[in-house]
Image (cartoon, coloured by chain):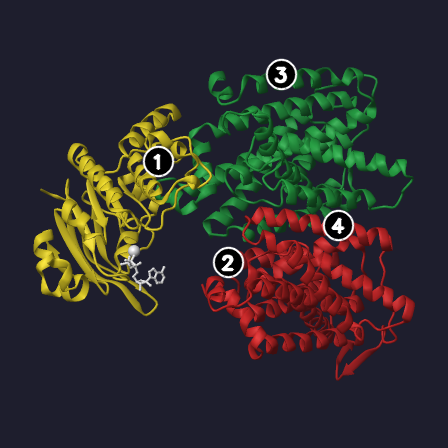
Amino acid sequence: MPVDIYLNVIVGGVLTGLVYGLMALGLSVIFGVMRVVNFAHGEMMTIAMYIAVALFSTFHLDPLVMLVPIAAVLFAFGYVLQAGLINNFITRPEYSQFLLLIAIAIIIVNTLLILFGPDSQNVQVSYAYDSFQLGPLIVDATKLHAGLTAVMVAVGLFAFFRLTRLGTAIRACADNYTGALVVGLDVKQLYALTFGIGAACVGAAGCMLLLIFDVTPSIGPAYTLLAFVIVIIGGMGSMPGAIVGGVLIGLTEAIAGLLFTPSAKSMFVFAILVLVLLARPQGILRSA
Amino acid sequence: MIGRLTEGIRPRTLIILAALLAFFIVAPLFASDYLLTMLILIFYFAYTGQSWNIMMGFAGQLSLGHALYVGLGAYAAAALFVHFGMAPWLGLAVAVPISAAAGAFIGFLAFRFRVAGVYFAVLTIAVAEFTRIGFDHLQWTGASAGLFLPVAQYAHNDLWTLRGHPAMFYYVLLAATAFAFIACRAMLQSRMGYFWLAIREDEEAARSAGIDTFRYKMLAVVISAAMTSFAGVIYAFYYNNLFPEQVFNISQSILIILAPMVGGLGTLFGPILGAFVIETVAEAMRTLLQWFGVDLPGTNQLFFGVVLLFVVLAVPEGVWPWLSKRMGLMEREP
Amino acid sequence: MSALLAVAGVTKRFRGLIAVDRVTFEVPAGGIFAVIGPNGAGKTTLFNMIAGVFRPDSGTIDFAGEQIAGLSPDRICRRGISRTFQIVRPFPALKVEDNVTIGALLHRKSVPDARAHAREVLRRLDLYGKREQRASALTLPDRKRLEVARALATDPKLLLLDEVMAGLRPTETDRMVRILKELNDEGRLTILLIEHVMRAVMALATHVLVMHHGAAISEGSPGEVVRDPAVIDSYLGAETVV
Ligand SMILES: Nc1ncnc2c1ncn2[C@@H]1O[C@H](COP(=O)(O)OP(=O)(O)OP(=O)(O)O)[C@@H](O)[C@H]1O
Ligand SMILES: [Mg+2]
């Protein structure tokens, strides 16, 4: 096979991986701050994807254009969900939180199934089949748009957590719960905000991913698992780790799909997970 | 032995239990096919839930990948039957060690390298998914196109090759559930059981009390995996067809853990009661929706999610502890 | 009297910080040996090395003539060293009796035997009446005694007690002192304890080691140690002695 095929696949993998990274970032932020694993993460993403599908099919609105309002809707969803339900479970044992989120996930999947039916759907944007040529390199327009948008959103989030007072307050909560209470932070409110931000992240990622993949109601669990794997690979609670992990997984999938059969690509993802768990259980970007 | 096994259980509870057992033994005589199918599912999930409970409820190790052991058991026995005509009870002698080895593999990786909690849970899902995709490509077992057993003749029951009427499967699962219940009770009252509980409660404190936590966690995984794989064998011979996409699916794993979680984690009656609650609710939903003429895919599952949510919010400890307290069924929890 | 436990030149660093700095001492068989020192002196870290939670960066730990440094906590416990945690860690959802039975099962194969032994231990620690309660329902003094009971049930030769009197009222402290004395007298159980409550140390210890900033700064009988100017400066403060 000629070298440029590899190159094209690698670039495509990295771009998809950036979107994966953004999706995982949402999970990582939620876990990092409140130590709750969002087992309904992928399902929340499918909500965003279906909103985007609906907006596209009725008003012909590009998912990337609608990214901000959709992310805002997901933010509100996440905020309400956390404040109304999940917050009561913060101090409960892990399995109890798990059961709660599984219930939420089942409700989401089946509501979408009732509303949109079981068939897979996608959006046919005007640039669906366009590609850019850079020397020997051919890049799909959809992947390029999606990947670059993911970078922009991620950078925005980093800036938010580093530079704004609110972001700093949330990080303070993550580092030291009691300390945050003592200095008078409204931890409850910050937790709800964090869950909202995590949901907005995965909502934005859903808009981007819709350019690359189809959506069905039942796809949620697979993405939850993928986000999970990425976060573990990158390091639970590490924000750069999520992006790096996402890119690594995007690359792995792309290369495995090229060298073997696309249907076996997840095997390689899980193999990497096992290797990382054994070599660096804390994740590649975290110190022991 | 019997004395120890029944210790702490009120006489009236024992009488209720005996009556229930007698009822379930005669149930197939008058139960409709519909009811029988439902009871089969209930005891299937009671049994798998009981097996899963050993890991999570007793030893505190959260496995979200128990479909792996069901799938391995199912495929091993079914493939041996299809290819070599080996009876499932002989196939069991291969299926159980394979599943136990898979459990030992996961346990060894996790416990040697200190992969714990959520990380451990994800490892179990990952191995199950890995295996699912592997079976999707394994030609010997029909790959993703599925593995089919010669379909049963309902004329006569052959227990040895597990070909026959659903009632036969019902009795096998009923016996398995009873066996698992007694075995779990005995294990919980053994030295190993105490050590499991110690590990579940506080692993570091358990280690400093002299418990070889690696060893006892390994025992929990291996026993749980071995027991679960038996359910897989029954699954294969009951449904007569196997698809990796179905048996190894994450949703299978989740179904397995729901009964003990809803019924009461770490309790012995929890998995059985939970299986009844879940199946009954699911069936009631289905009937109700039919009654109203609602025929949208997902409605049934949606209500199921809502009920689950209700259980989590209203009886977070599970239904059994709540019921047992209400009705004074136990002198002390096992 | 021969040494049951011999710690020699043991050091432990956490990143830059030297938590324990070349500490050497010997605990004679049958004695009650106390380690005292201000907060952060490295006492718990020293215990953690003896109990196998941490491997020392350097130095040796001999127990009953054998090298135990670096063995896992469960191995060390099986050899006869049992410990309590400064921040108590009972098995919360289990009954008091089951907590102690778990300890007793270490050297007993049969559960009824272990239970019988556990009851005996519970009686000694004045917890028998509470054996059916969940550990999480106990008060702090009770939990501290439960911690001791569980450790004791493993039939140790050496008992490591990390601040079992902290947070107890004086009457509770005296009760614990009495219990420990009994254990030491009849069972010839050797005890190594970390303690801030000087009243208890003076009443119990045959020998005291004082730690400060990771190092052993003084050693001797309780009477000697409290008069050592270095100890008064760094830990006790002048008023305590008077
Ligand atoms: N696991 C650890 N990681 C990093 N530093 C630690 C760890 N354990 C203890 N330290 C540090 O080592 C020093 C000694 O701590 P240690 O707990 O041994 O003190 P201590 O004498 O038991 O104090 P106290 O009387 O408060 O219990 C402290 O500065 C502490 O912060
Ligand atoms: Mg200390």
Q: Earlier in the sequence, mark 2 or mark 4?
A: 4
Q: Which mark is residue C103?
A: 1
Crowd around label 4: few <14 · some 14–19 · many ≥20 (10 Å): many
Spatial CA distance of label 2 from label 4 is 32 Å
Is B181 situated above or below A188?
above
Spatial CA distance of label 3 from label 1 is 36 Å
- Chain depicted in yellow: C
Q: Is mark 3 within 8 Å of ligand 1?
A: no
Spatial CA distance of label 4 from label 3 is 38 Å
- Chain depicted in red: A
Q: Looking at numbered disc 2 in the image, what kind of residue is underneath it?
A: Pro
Q: Residue at x 24, y 46 (%)?
A: C170
Give the residue number, with chain letter if any, for mark 4: A107
Asked if labels 2 and 4 share a chain, the reply is yes
Residue contact between numbered discs 4 and 3, judged by CB atoms under 8 Å:
no
Left or right: C175 with respect to B73? left
Q: Which chain hosts label 1?
A: C
Left or right: A82 with respect to A276? right
Give the residue number, with chain letter if any, for mark 2: A281
Task: Kindly report which numbered mark, 4 or 1, lies closer to the viewer in this rendering.
Answer: 4
As rendered, which of C107 and B325 lies closer to the eye? B325
Residue A258 in view, yes or no: yes
**Residue B17 percent across, percent down from the top left:** 62, 19
Secondary element at image label 1: helix
Q: Residue at x 29, y 28 (%)?
A: C120
Q: Residue at x 75, y 50 (%)?
A: A107
Task: Kindly report which numbered mark, 3 or 2, lies closer to the viewer in this rendering.
Answer: 3
